[in-house]
Amino acid sequence: MKKILHWILVHRMGVVLALFLFLLFNLMATLSDWRADLTEEKRYTLDKATSQQIQALNEPIEVFVFLKGDFPSGFKKLATSTEQFLSLLQKQNPTRFHYQFISPLEEVSEGKLWGDSLLSMGALNINLTVQKKAGQSSNILFPVALVQYKGQQSLVTLLPGASRAISQTELNRAEALLEFQFTSVIDKLVHPRKPGIAYEIGHGEPTDQRTYQLRVALQKDYELRTLDLTRQPAVPAGVDLLLLVKPTLRFSENEKLKIDQFVMRGGKLLCFIDNLVAEMDSFGRKPSIVAFDRDLNLGDLFFRYGARINPDLVMDLRCEVSYIQVGGTTDQPQNEFLPWNYYPLAGAPAADKKLKTAGYVGLRFANSIDTVEAPGVSKTPLLASSERARIISTPALISLNENSTVPENKLFSRGEISVAMLLEGELTSLYRNRIYGAKADSMSSAGQPFIAQAKQAGVLLVADGDLVLNDYIPAVDDKGAYDPQAPLVPTEMGWNPYTHFEYLTGGEAGRYFIPVANKEFLLNSVEYLISNPAISGLRAKEITLRLLDGEKVNQYRLWVQLLFILFPLLLLIGGGLLFQTIRKRQFAR
């Protein structure tokens, strides 16, 4: 080795040979697909389920990403991360997987822009204002991708909980979810069989227009049907998930047994429960109401599974505003937009490694959830309050006059109060050691013998029945005008109708509008419970945000600048001088 280096330094062709070897090595590295993922979280490595899915494609699949244009640095970084991920997918099946980046302002057909098509498909857009030398420039951004396969197409959300500004934390979360988002959508296109969901209607559950967005959200990818447990002998075959939304009537023991045995047989249960009677409409008759127990008779069932929905109300300083009467008379009320602590904005707690719903989820008169000991059952909180929250127990007096004064912050001292809980594992039947004799014989003769314990069950409890319902507001055109005589249109699931209307019409209170992620939480919950477990597990992928220590950076700023600016220059000069000295000595001989 020493002789080779000596020959390169002394011989006239040494430099030429070294340069040739360097170029040859770079050319070979360019042509080779080999790469080493040295990141701790394997950021550039595909999961086995993803690789098998792409390699098994038997028809071409096209992906259109609408992140092409002049965007702020955060969205450019998201576009770069998306392209890097899609390139990994393309290497798994180059002949059948294709992708391209296009602008929403390009034409999809003559006279029709891609942006218009995306809006008609339900894609949410972001109106960005970019500062340029000539002034400000407005730019419409669609953080989505469109996947087309065998004549079908579906949208992929690249930035869950999208906002005008994108923080490094949000960007990391979006990058970590890229694999799950694309794999989940492709799986639904490749395997078009729709799982069955039964919406229970026998106990006063909403069936009016408040469930419009719920039906629209679920009917696309699932077979949605209604089910009356008071009439059906059991949950029928073909139902993968039973959905209970804001029941108001008491469940009998026989009806609870039907739910219990559905869970014991591997069916999934998703419940949105209002444990107390507390409705905003009640304030139309009097300025204060008393929240009291609904007596649904479901407490012992949930308790056996490992959780308890408490008879209380969660109040939070991080909350929505409401349009509330603060004075005046019945004929001439004086209304104002004020924070309403009974409408908390819940978020995903740090312990949530399952759904990781981005953005806030809007709640209304929610209850808290506690866990109880249940052997073989894992419990994961999915939604929780902020660090400045409190609970009030029943009987709870709720008054509109609470908004006339600033809440006492010292009372809001509890943090991360759970309002949604996922229960998984070997759930035990509530009716274990209670079903025998004629009842057990009748169940066996009906082809559904009693099961005392589930091998792998899943129950998701949410202590708010309004989370998946929608309101209605007057229709507003693109110019912010509305016709009072026109039919009302539905808001998105859980969106505040007052602030949303103000936002659309350019009202002052529009600044309070928050596009809560209730729909995303519902879809994430359903997908996690009944989708392919290998794909659901991709949600757990995380990208660690490694930040510099700001205090040390300021303390050693000068030394860092010298190390990374001056030292390389000195090293380069020293190397050049050493090289010239060696050559002079060799030629001097």
Image (spheres, helix red, strand yellow):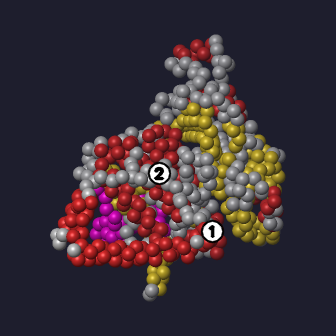
**Residue 311 visible at all:** yes
Residue 338 drawn at (x, y percent)? 73, 67
Residue 209 drawn at (x, y percent)? 57, 52
The amino acid beneath tag 2 is Glu
* Furthest-bottom residue in this view: 134
Would residue 439 appear left or right of 25 to someone viewing this image? Answer: right
Between disc 1 and disc 2, whose residue precedes? 2
Q: Quadrant of the C terminus?
A: bottom left
Q: Residue at x 81, y 60 (%)?
A: 410
- Span highlighted in magenta in the image: 98-126
The amino acid beneath tag 1 is Glu
Element carrying mark 2: loop
Residue 504 drawn at (x, y percent)? 56, 70
* Furthest-top residue in this view: 437
* Neighbours of disc 1 within 10 Å: few (<14), some (14-19), many (20+): few
Residue 136 drawn at (x, y percent)? 48, 82
* Neighbours of disc 2 within 10 Å: few (<14), some (14-19), many (20+): few
Which label belongs to residue 551?
A: 1
* Residue 200 counted in the magenta span: no
Mark 2, residue position: 40
The quadrant where residue 232 appears: top right
